[in-house]
């Protein structure tokens, strides 16, 4: 557990221990800036010497893992839950618009083929994901002096492999190469057995022409197969086994996946613009996997992947038990009235009984964030990880049931929520 420290002028310094932070705070040489994550600002001038902090970003479709390492120690680890409601909401908006337009202006000329998409356009759901990923790095940069940023963009490097079918076995050596080859083959054969299309079972690398009969180790001679198929095939070739088409399929090399290039333009480019191109490096899934399993021996999670991404290959770091949970929430609520004749007001004031939307609370023994407030005063408490409603607390129980979760310094890892990742105006954001 680390306490984040900002200098007198607001620039991030190296994080410190809770003990040292307490000494600073009790002697009034520092003040608490934010409680989540626990950050203090020094009230005296210091040197701003810092050691390099490396940030690892594990991009994902539902969750982004983010971690920071410094001096062979993990100093920050978080999982950011992305929004998954965007395409549904846009669909809803589209339907409302359609009905409204036909209702009000029935003879309006059709306008659907006169729009153009700007270059670099991404679907809104993907754009939100990419922007949130960049935001997560900015969030870390406010409390830690970031040196290097590593972003995982795909499972393997098709550019670097050039044409693995041609460059062949000579380049594929060592343990890391085994991971690269496996990831490549898994992607090429859609993570399923090439013969019986089974997925979700342990898959093995299989030689089309067996090694015992002079088959090579080149990717063009390799497929992914389940154990029964691999054993059943034995020392026969794929053709003899009854699958001549697999042999032809294996000769076609895999090209760069579309999502890899979209991550490159939507995440890596903005990061390079904001932090400098020389500080942003690209990493691949097979390296992460090797580092996480073989070097760090950590279970699979987005936060652990991010730790593996932040490390140099082969570097051993001390992991953190603290994993922050961040959640992306919509900026606002646009609907103002509902009811058959739009007679019900549906927005709540900024504060209801001193509670704000998205505040972290405890209700009926469960911890969550305020996801909704009813007219009568009931609060919907939602889970930070899943975003699903946990409890709805009735108005007369409100006072006694809901209380602000007091987070003492040493417990602040237990649950944390930083929904909008807002920071005080003084820090320049
Ligand atoms: Zn099989």
Image (cartoon, helix red, strand yellow):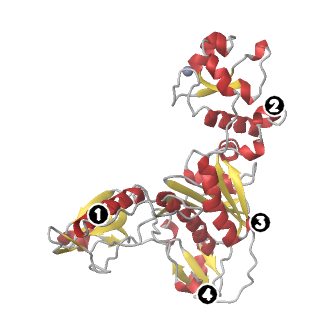
Q: Which residue is mark 2?
A: 169
Looking at the image, tell me whether mark 1 or mark 2 is earlier in sequence order: 1
Q: Which residue is mark 4?
A: 29
Looking at the image, tell me whether mark 3 or mark 4 is earlier in sequence order: 4
Classify mark 3: helix, strand or loop: helix
Closer to the camera: disc 2 or disc 4?
Answer: 2
Q: Quadrant of the C terminus?
A: bottom right
Tell me how far mark 2 sits from mark 4, CA to CA.
61 Å
Classify mark 1: helix, strand or loop: helix
Q: Which residue is mark 3?
A: 278
Tell me how far mark 3 sits from mark 4, CA to CA.
36 Å
Q: Which residue is mark 1?
A: 96
Looking at the image, tell me whether mark 3 or mark 2 is earlier in sequence order: 2
In the image, taking residue 51 as reference, residue 134 lies left or right, namely left
Looking at the image, tell me whether mark 2 or mark 4 is earlier in sequence order: 4
Tell me how far mark 1 sits from mark 2, CA to CA.
58 Å
């Amino acid at each position: 557990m680390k306490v984040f420290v900002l200098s007198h002028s607001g620039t991030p310094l190296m994080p410190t221990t809770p003990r040292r932070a307490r000494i600073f705070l009790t002697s009034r040489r520092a003040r608490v800036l934010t409680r989540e994550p626990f950050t203090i600002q020094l009230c005296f001038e210091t040197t701003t010497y810092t050691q390099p902090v490396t940030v690892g970003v594990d991009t994902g479709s539902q969750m982004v893992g983010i971690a920071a390492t410094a001096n062979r120690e993990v100093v920050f680890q978080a999982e950011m839950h992305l929004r998954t409601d965007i395409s549904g909401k846009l669909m809803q908006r589209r339907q409302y618009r359609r009905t409204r337009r036909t209702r009000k202006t029935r003879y309006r000329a059709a306008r659907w083929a006169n729009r153009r998409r700007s270059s670099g356009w991404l679907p809104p759901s993907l754009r939100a994901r990419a922007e949130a990923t960049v935001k997560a790095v900015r969030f870390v940069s406010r409390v830690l002096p970031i040196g290097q940023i590593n972003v995982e963009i795909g499972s393997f490097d098709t550019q670097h492999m050039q044409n693995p079918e041609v460059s062949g076995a000579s380049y594929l050596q060592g343990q890391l190469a085994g991971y690269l080859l496996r990831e490549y083959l898994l992607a090429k054969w859609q993570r399923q057995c090439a013969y019986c299309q089974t997925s979700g079972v342990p898959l093995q690398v299989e030689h089309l022409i067996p090694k015992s009969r002079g088959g090579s180790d080149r990717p063009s001679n390799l497929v992914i197969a389940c154990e029964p198929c691999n054993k059943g095939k034995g020392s026969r070739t794929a053709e003899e086994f009854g699958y001549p088409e697999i042999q032809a399929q294996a000769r076609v090399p895999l090209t760069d996946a579309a999502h890899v290039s979209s991550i490159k333009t939507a995440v890596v480019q903005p990061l390079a613009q904001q932090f400098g191109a020389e500080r942003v490096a690209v990493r691949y899934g097979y390296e992460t996997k090797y580092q996480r399993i073989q070097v760090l021996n950590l279970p699979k999670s987005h936060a652990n992947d991010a730790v593996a991404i932040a490390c140099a290959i082969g570097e051993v770091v001390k992991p953190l038990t603290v994993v922050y949970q961040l959640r992306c929430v919509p900026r606002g609520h646009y609907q103002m009235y509902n009811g058959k004749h739009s007679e019900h007001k549906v927005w709540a004031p900024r504060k209801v009984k001193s509670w704000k939307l998205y505040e972290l609370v405890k209700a009926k023994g469960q911890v969550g964030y305020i996801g909704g407030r009813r007219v009568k005063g009931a609060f919907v408490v939602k889970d930070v990880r899943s975003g699903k409603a946990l409890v709805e607390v009735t108005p007369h129980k409100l006072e006694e049931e809901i209380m602000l979760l007091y987070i003492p310094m040493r417990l602040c890892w237990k649950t944390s929520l930083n929904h909008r990742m807002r920071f005080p105006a003084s820090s320049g954001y």
